[in-house]
Image: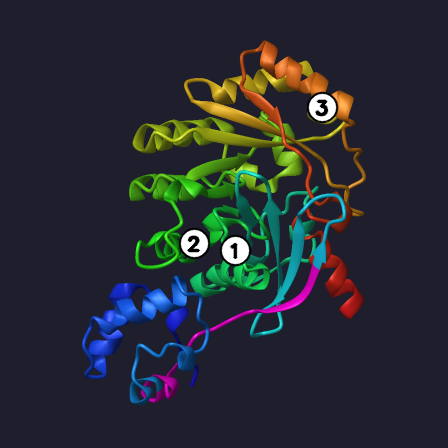
């Protein structure tokens, strides 16, 4: 029988667990602190619990972990790419990025992705399963242990669509944000979505003031459907309405992620349609250079082309930045390294 994963449990669930075995419920906060604040992954290291209690817990519980298959360090900046192996031998990726201001990790929420965006490496090998809250947490904790550094910012922008795994992602956020644990500020957490309207609506109802980033990539409905199949069931007009509601409920600025593809989505008309998606919103556009994959034969826009597109947007009054490319020498775009590893392992 599979053991209960203590890392996957919030304080309330741990309290119920301890009460069910005749222990005081205050033990829950002690255990939660050691797992999520002290970053302990072995019950024998949690000496605040008696040896007898630890032995009792070992009979039917565990603290899960993931293993580092490979770490690749960029030679041009402080970016580090991790390939992790899960308990069932599935593989995911995370990217650690360091700046003077903070340490950021980009983490995965699924093994593979169903969304089918034609230019994205994450979706090329299909979808296997959702990650548990514990597996999402472990990416943060494993990198912190490996580097002996605290991670300040968390971006759910790795492999997978976070809103396709909503319940586990929400549990992850509440655990990582807990004062009794890692205590990551809620405004230091960003969820990136391909535009799943139902997920945006559910997140708005929670009232959590996380940052929301929308993978837009084209503001023209039919053209967006051509590169992002998920757009067919999540129309831009309805997406815009959902974002207005989200901002009204949370007061958080909306970010649009926009991969600039040469002669595909970089005209003045495209800029005008982006402007319509910003109407009524406190919104910001991040322009991103296309990371080439073998399965998509379009050309990445050159730096001068991206700069010209930025100027088009700014002339329309849109707050725009060009995202600094990090880890370009280590396939830091999520999915690229996993795909290569799985191909070589076959």
Report helix, strand or loop for mark 3: helix
Measure the C-alpha gap from mark 1 to mark 3. Answer: 30 Å
Disc 3: which residue: 306
Position of 153 with respect to 174 (left or right) is: right
Position of 310 with respect to 149 (left or right) is: right
Report helix, strand or loop for mark 1: loop
On-image quarter of the C terminus: bottom right
**Residue found at x 31% / y 59%:** 180
Position of 117 with respect to 46 (left or right) is: right
Q: Are marks 1 and 2 in contact (CB under 8 Å)?
A: yes
Disc 2: which residue: 169
Magenta segment: does it hold 49?
no
Pick the residue in front: 158 or 231.
158
Residue 263 visible, this angle: no
Pick the residue in front: 26 or 333.
26
**Residue found at x 73% / y 49%:** 74
How many numbered marks are there?
A: 3
**Residue found at x 55% / y 54%:** 108
Magenta segment: 55-71
To which quarter of the image does residue 16 belong? Answer: bottom left
Report helix, strand or loop for mark 2: helix
From what the image shows, is residue 203 above or below residue 238? Answer: below
Magenta segment: does it hold 63?
yes
Measure the C-alpha gap from mark 3 to mark 2. Answer: 33 Å
Going from N to C along the chain, the mark reached first, 1 or 2, is 1
Residue 224 visible, this angle: yes
On-image quarter of the N terminus: bottom left
Check disc 3: other Cα within 10 Å, few if <14, some if 14-19, many if 20+: many
Disc 1: which residue: 109
Measure the C-alpha gap from mark 1 to mark 2. Answer: 7 Å
**Residue found at x 46% / y 48%:** 163
Going from N to C along the chain, the mark reached first, 1 or 3, is 1
């Amino acid at each position: 029988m599979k053991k209960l994963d203590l890392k996957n449990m919030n304080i309330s669930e741990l309290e119920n667990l301890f009460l069910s075995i005749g222990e005081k419920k205050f033990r829950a906060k002690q255990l939660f602190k050691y797992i999520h604040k002290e970053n302990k992954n072995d019950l024998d290291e949690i000496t605040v619990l008696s040896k007898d209690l630890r032995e009792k817990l070992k009979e039917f519980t565990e603290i899960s972990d993931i293993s580092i298959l490979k770490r690749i360090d960029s030679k041009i900046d402080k970016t580090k790419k991790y390939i992790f192996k899960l308990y069932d031998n599935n593989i995911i990726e995370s990217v650690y990025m360091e700046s003077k201001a903070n340490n950021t990790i980009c983490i995965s929420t699924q093994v593979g992705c169903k969304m089918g965006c034609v230019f994205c490496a994450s979706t090329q090998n299909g979808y296997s399963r959702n990650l548990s809250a514990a597996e999402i947490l472990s990416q943060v904790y494993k990198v912190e242990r490996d580097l002996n550094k605290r991670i300040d910012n968390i971006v759910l922008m790795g492999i997978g669509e976070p809103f396709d795994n909503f319940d586990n992602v929400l549990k992850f956020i509440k655990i990582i944000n807990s004062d009794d644990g890692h205590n990551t500020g809620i405004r230091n957490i960003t969820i990136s979505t391909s535009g799943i309207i139902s997920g945006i609506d559910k997140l708005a109802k929670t009232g959590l003031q996380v940052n929301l980033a929308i993978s837009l990539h084209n503001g023209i409905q039919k053209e967006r459907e051509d590169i992002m199949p998920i757009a067919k069931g999540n129309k831009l007009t309805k997406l815009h309405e959902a974002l207005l509601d989200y901002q009204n409920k949370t007061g958080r600025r909306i970010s649009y992620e926009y991969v600039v593809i040469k002669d595909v989505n970089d005209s003045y008309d495209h800029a005008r349609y982006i402007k319509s998606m910003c109407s009524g919103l406190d919104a910001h556009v991040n322009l991103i250079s296309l990371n080439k994959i073998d399965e998509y034969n379009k050309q990445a826009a050159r730096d001068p082309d991206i700069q010209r597109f930025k100027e088009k947007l700014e002339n329309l009054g849109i707050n725009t930045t060009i995202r600094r490319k990090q880890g370009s020498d280590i396939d830091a775009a999520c999915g690229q390294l996993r795909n290569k590893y799985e191909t070589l392992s076959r």
